[in-house]
Amino acid sequence: MYLSGFATFLLAVAPLILGSPLLPREDERLDEAVFLTTCFKYMKSNDATPNGRDDKLWYFKNYDDSIKGAQFDEAYASNPGDQNHPVDWTSGTVGNPVTGTLDKKPFKVWGLTEKGDDKTFVTGYADLGGAPMRCYNNSASYWKQDYGEKMYVKCSAKYYCTRNSRQIRRTVVTTSSTMQSIPFLGKQNYDVKNDYGVQEQVKNAFLWLKDHYKSNAADGEGYKIGSKDYKMTYAVNRMEKEGDPYYEADRINQVADLVAEKMLPELWAKDKISDEKAWPSGSKILAEATHTLPFPKQIKVQVQVAQQAMLDWEDRDTVVFTVEKGNECKVDSVLSLAIKGAFKAVSAATTGGVSAVANGLGFVVGELAAGAC
């Protein structure tokens, strides 16, 4: 399928070309990571004052394992010319690096600065058994672990290092600020305000993307939504094919689930009820009404990858949801910002370093675009 019909809005993005993805071999861990950690020990009976400090190198076979704190190996780090702790991570130089041994391989790191690059967070270099690495200033990694029966440790990592060639993934959800109001006729129920049948219809407007993609339908085809002649159309472009290193068969379904989950609460908060009818039914009151909700004219979802050290993002999978047959041109800045915030909140539990070959959508970014009327 080919992507088309982006007339309502398009981000002006220059084409970026990544090098051919490296296919991992069994004996090579292209997504390995080393975290430079500082750990403080505490008595469980007194967690106000540290009872010792360790500066260690934590090795993870895969970066994503670091989110769980499940390190594969660890080692004490050595200051250049000083075997005593604490370690000054910024003290390493090319000729006299901070060193250690991880996974039976020599590790060295040098050239770190207090703050990494403003855009990429990159700072300094490392080498693990001959594999070159780049390092990053990091403020999001914290772990807490038991240390025997009476103690525990709190660890944080100001820096981590990954392979030079490592590529990461993110998903950008761009919503138009122009809206189209769409009426939905509710069914008889006892709770008009929270008509779950209508809510299901709203979610299906986004979930039908799954059927569209599965049936290999042409771009621009879609499904009727609401009680009038409105239509949600879909356009899908997949750069990766089965067998490619970034390919994930379920990715389009993940996009549909993400958009449906995050859009429903924001749209439903703007629900306007009209033409309400009610009548007694036994000891309760049955009712039905029309629910009118604003839909963004267009939502563009870009699943992207980039070389971590460069952040030269390139689209891999792109999906566009478009509301058709509506002539309304209303800008709702409040709703647009709420939608942007909803997608931004998805990444509260993850980081910007999610591997391009990991499952899922990676770090999610919410953006706005002014839609043409």
Image: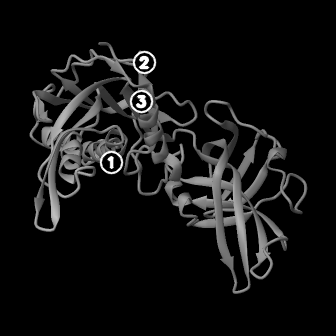
Q: Earlier in the sequence, mark 1 or mark 2?
A: 2
| Mark sitting on residue 261 | 1
User: Which residue is the site of mark 2?
Assistant: 13
Q: Is residue 160 visible?
A: yes
Compared across the picture, whether 129 is left or right of 200 comes to right
Q: Total label count?
A: 3
From the viewer's perspective, is the residue at label 3 or at label 2 nearer?
3
- Is mark 1 in CB contact (under 8 Å) with mark 3? no
Q: Secondary structure at mark 1?
A: helix
Residue type, numbered disc 3 = Ser
Q: Secondary structure at mark 3?
A: helix
- Front-most of 336 and 188? 188
The quadrant of the image that shows the N terminus is: top left
- Is mark 3 in CB contact (under 8 Å) with mark 2? no
In the displayed structure, 48 sits above or below 141; it is: below
Query: Where is residue 199 shown, x and y percent of the image?
Result: 23, 48
Residue type, numbered disc 1 = Glu
Residue type, numbered disc 2 = Val
Q: CA distance from mark 1 to mark 2?
A: 28 Å
User: Which residue is the site of mark 3?
Assistant: 336
